[in-house]
Image (tube, rainbow, N blue to C red):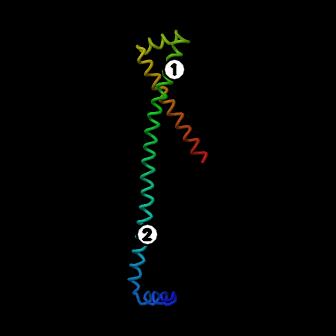
């Protein structure tokens, strides 16, 4: 069968098809293609959302680890090089553990703040 013959058959079939049937066929085709496209993009969104959550959890634990290290270093240097300030801070906060926890909280906020500023600069740079 030649291509012209197939094309003319299809054309005749379309000419005989009522307008309403053509509308239904077109609508069905459009709906199916929209569903396929939507499924592709929604799958990518789910994957991206999971990646963002995993990245945020990783940053949280990295921030805790860095905060522990930095606060310990601050605690050590404060006690070693500024003993008078160290003793006065211990008296103000009532214990050494409270001083260390205060330094840890300060470092935690500082690391997260630095991360937020870095993210903002990276976003503005794009």
Residue 56 falls in image quadrant: top left
Place of residue 124 in the rendered image (x, y in percent of width and height, measured from the top left): 59, 45
Residue at the extreme right of the image, as rendered:
125
Residue picked out by circle 1: 73
Q: Residue at x 42, y 57 (%)?
A: 42
Callout 1 secondary element? helix
Place of residue 15 in the rendered image (x, y in percent of width and height, measured from the top left): 44, 89
Residue picked out by circle 2: 33
Could you say which disc has been placed on residue 101 in the image? none
Q: Residue at x 44, y 33 (%)?
A: 61
The tag earlier along the polypeptide, 1 or 2, is 2
- Relative horizontal placement of residue 57, taking residue 125 as reference (left or right): left
**Nearest to the observer: residue 36 or residue 23:** 36
Callout 2 secondary element? helix
Q: Residue at x 47, y 37 (%)?
A: 59
Q: Residues within 10 Å of mark 1 (few under 14, many from 20)?
A: few
């Amino acid at each position: 069968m030649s291509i012209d013959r197939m094309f003319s058959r299809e054309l005749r079939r379309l000419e005989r098809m009522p307008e309403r049937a053509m509308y239904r066929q077109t609508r069905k085709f459009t709906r199916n293609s929209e569903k396929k496209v939507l499924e592709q993009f929604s799958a990518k969104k789910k994957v991206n959302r999971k990646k963002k959550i995993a990245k945020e959890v990783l940053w949280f634990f990295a921030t805790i680890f860095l905060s522990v290290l930095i606060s310990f270093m601050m605690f050590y240097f404060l006690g070693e090089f500024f003993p008078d300030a160290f003793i006065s801070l211990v008296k103000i906060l009532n214990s050494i553990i409270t001083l260390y926890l205060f330094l840890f909280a300060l470092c935690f906020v500082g690391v997260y703040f630095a991360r937020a500023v870095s993210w903002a600069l990276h976003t503005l740079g794009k």
